[in-house]
Amino acid sequence: MHRRHRLVVASAIGSALPIALVLAACSGGGGDQKSGAGAPNGGSSTAGADLTGAGATFPYPIYSKWFSDYAAKTGVKINYQSIGSGGGIRQLTEGTVDFGASDAPMSDAELAKTKGPVLHVPTVMGAVVVTYNVPGVTQPLRLTGDVIANAFLGKITKWNDPRIAALNPGVTLPLTDVLVVHRSDGSGTTYIFSDYLTAVSPAWAKAPGRGKELQWPGGMGGKGNEGVAGQVKQTPGAIGYVELAYAKQNHLAYATVKNANGEFVVPTIESVTAAGAGAAATLPPNTDFRVSIVNAPGAGAYPISSFTYLLLNKTPTDAAKGKKLLDFVKWALSDGEQSAAALDYAPLPPAIVSRINARLDSLSVGATS
């Protein structure tokens, strides 16, 4: 399995704006996630779509806005099924969609199964948050990687456990069971979360480790970020992990997490940006962008941060669709990035955008390369 290289990425971003989660479906492009509060309501029909894609739920809020805005601007309709990163990689490999989307970069083994080379295109950076539903607790809880790992491993079973209490002096914690909620589908959000826990917890690194799908020691499954958010919202005592926008849209509490510098950091645009400082200078000239920014050093860095990717065939067989897709991606990396902060994603640094555009310009749409 390809292991993402560690690095730090940077960009000066303004303060986080209030979320304006846009879940408008474009030509039926919402996905098949029906369960949980905030689930997309769009159908999965591709009728009338110019382009079809599938994959990660992590970036669905911003992708939905991008597809809607782009359709209004150009008339190009993009159907996107929010089915999880694993499903997006599978459909791209099978050739049933024009593009995939994933929060986890494809492994070397996965790339070997595709019909042609695949380009990973980072689109935005985002945060995975530890969300919870603890009766009577109104202030954000402080958690460390070790405590989070032990809760999800089933080794912390009560919310008033001394290890949680020690991190939260003055907070009255109830004698309530800790009920784990995790993804039931192949998920890039799971990959980011488990990538972080693997980096900070030797016990987690041993098992279940890092991956889009894990052998969980217990807990309830939810499909998509939407499903996990819905389960946590309706289950007292629950703890789960979702992309920041889903926690905000569902009015869920989420933790401040101790970073590599020993600071307890709130997930925000600024702290995700801090987790990514310096990428333009550290990425090698031949980078394929398959990198990790979890547990990044640096003041104010939120430790469970990541890129999310569009997955493009480098040698599309349909030249017309290939051209439409490249035009959309270039628009997303310029005009689309301006919507990122309002939806609680960190825009890419301009230097990274320039690197990606240079890679896109090198492609010969509809021809082999």
Image: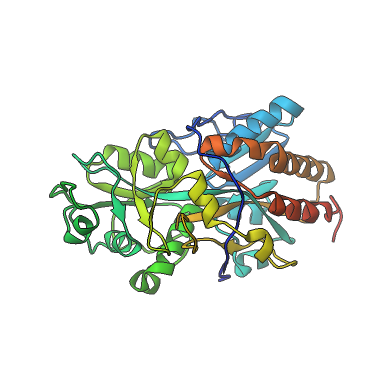
Inspect this view and state whether residue 24 appears.
yes
Image colouring: rainbow
Q: Residue 56 appears at what percent x and percent y?
A: 54, 48
Residue 294 shown left or right of residue 319 in the figure: left
Residue 278 locus on image (x, y percent): 62, 60
Check the image and name the residue furthest to the left: 175
Q: Quadrant of residue 292?
A: bottom right
Q: Is residue 36 above or below residue 307?
A: above
Report the residue at 57% width, 38% height from top.
62
Q: Residue at x 19, y 47 (%)?
A: 171
> Residue 306: percent from the left, percent from the top?
53, 55
Which of these two is toward me, 213 or 175?
A: 175
- Image quadrant for the C terminus? bottom right
Nearest to the observer: residue 233 or residue 283? 283
Q: Residue at x 77, y 56 (%)?
A: 314
Position above or below: 5 against 256: below
How many numbered circles does the render carry?
0
Task: Locate the N terminus and report the quarter of the image it occupies.
Answer: bottom right
Q: Is residue 45 visible?
A: no
Q: Residue furthest top?
A: 72
Q: Tell me residue 293's x, y (percent).
A: 53, 61
Q: Residue at x 32, y 63 (%)?
A: 149
Q: Is residue 290 toward the left or the right of residue 269 in the image?
A: right
Position of residue 15 relative to residue 116, above or below, is above
